[in-house]
Image (tube, rainbow, N blue to C red):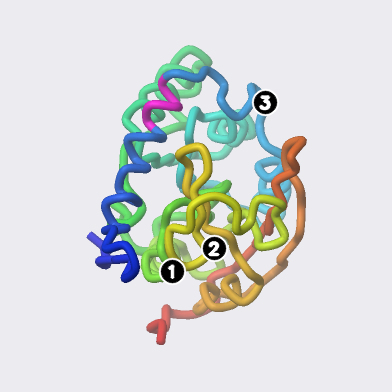
Amino acid sequence: MYYILLRNTNTGVNLKKILDKQQLHWGDKLASIPDMFGKGYSESARKAKEVFKKAGVKKILELGGGQGRDTIFFAQNGFQVYVLDYSEAGIKIITEKVRAMGLSELVIAKCHDVRAPLPFEDASFDGCYSHLVYCMALTTSELECLSDEIRRILKLGGINIYTARNTEDPLYKQGIHRGEDMYEMDGFIVHYFSAEKIWHLSKGFEIISIDRCEESRLPRRLFRVTLKKTREPLAFS
């Protein structure tokens, strides 16, 4: 597993334990709140579909599928989707939905923590998609490892599209500081991204675009990042 020990030197709090508790918190919320993020697909998924279709992407890995709203959208548009979520509740919901909609042949759902190596062979996907997974309770070190893993499982020329809340978000620096640019509100920890962090995590990729967008009435302010695998991974320094 890709873990590092984090400790707040002022309070002695073991931040790793706090970050680890997010798995249970998310599982409880996904199980208890139907259509937590809405019934329809996200705008980010719609944009990603356009990019994937143009690039000839057919087989997608989706990270953090939640309750499956984007998973279903991709499957309905003809993509073969392998979806991971670290909540058993989320995977159960996705599996039940795709079965009811007759999409089981296009969707394979597995429970997995993205802090661990991805359970797939090298160069086995045309594209990777994740909506707000990068800005979960993941340290920069864990994000580096995740970026390495995504490059590994993508074919040369493969597309990686992700979104993350950014440091222009109105809730940035609100709530309890949990290390780096991570802040906790209402039990959810968010890692807010700067443009510099995107560039740092792009090693081994060509940056196709970095777009600013908004979501929900709050609004959440996001980066939508589109990358293409162009060469073999380089070690982060």
Q: Which mark is residue 40?
A: 3
Task: Count every numbered label the image shows and give the total.
Answer: 3
> Could you tell whether 228 is left or right of 97 in the image?
right
Magenta stretch contains residue 30: yes
By secondary structure, the bulk of the magenta-drawn segment is best described as: helix
Q: Which residue is mark 2?
A: 158
**Which residue sits at x=46%, y=43%?**
64
Circles 2 and 1 in contact, beta carbons < 8 Å:
no
What secondary structure is found at the residue carrying circle 2? strand
Task: Check the picture and name the quadrant holding the N terminus.
Answer: bottom left
> Could you tell whether 43 is left or right of 156 in the image?
right
Q: Position of residue 174 (x, y in %)?
A: 60, 52
Viewer-proximal residue, 194 or 43?
Answer: 194
**Badge 2: few (under 14), some or many (20 or more) residues near its Cα, within 10 Å?**
many
Q: Nearer the viewer, mark 2 or mark 3?
A: 3
Viewer-proximal residue, 82 or 38?
Answer: 38
What secondary structure is found at the residue carrying circle 3? loop
Distance Cα–Cα, label 2 vs label 3: 27 Å
Residue sticking out furthest to the top: 100
Q: Which mark is residue 140?
A: 1
Q: Position of residue 191 (x, y in %)?
A: 52, 57
**Badge 3: few (under 14), some or many (20 or more) residues near its Cα, within 10 Å?**
few
Distance Cα–Cα, label 2 vs label 1: 23 Å
Viewer-proximal residue, 18 or 60?
Answer: 18
Q: Nearer the viewer, mark 3 or mark 1?
A: 1
Circles 3 and 1 in contact, beta carbons < 8 Å:
no
Type of the residue with mark 3: Gly
Type of the residue with mark 1: Thr
Placement of 23 over or under 138, stated as above or below: above
Magenta stretch contains residue 43: no
Magenta range is 27-31
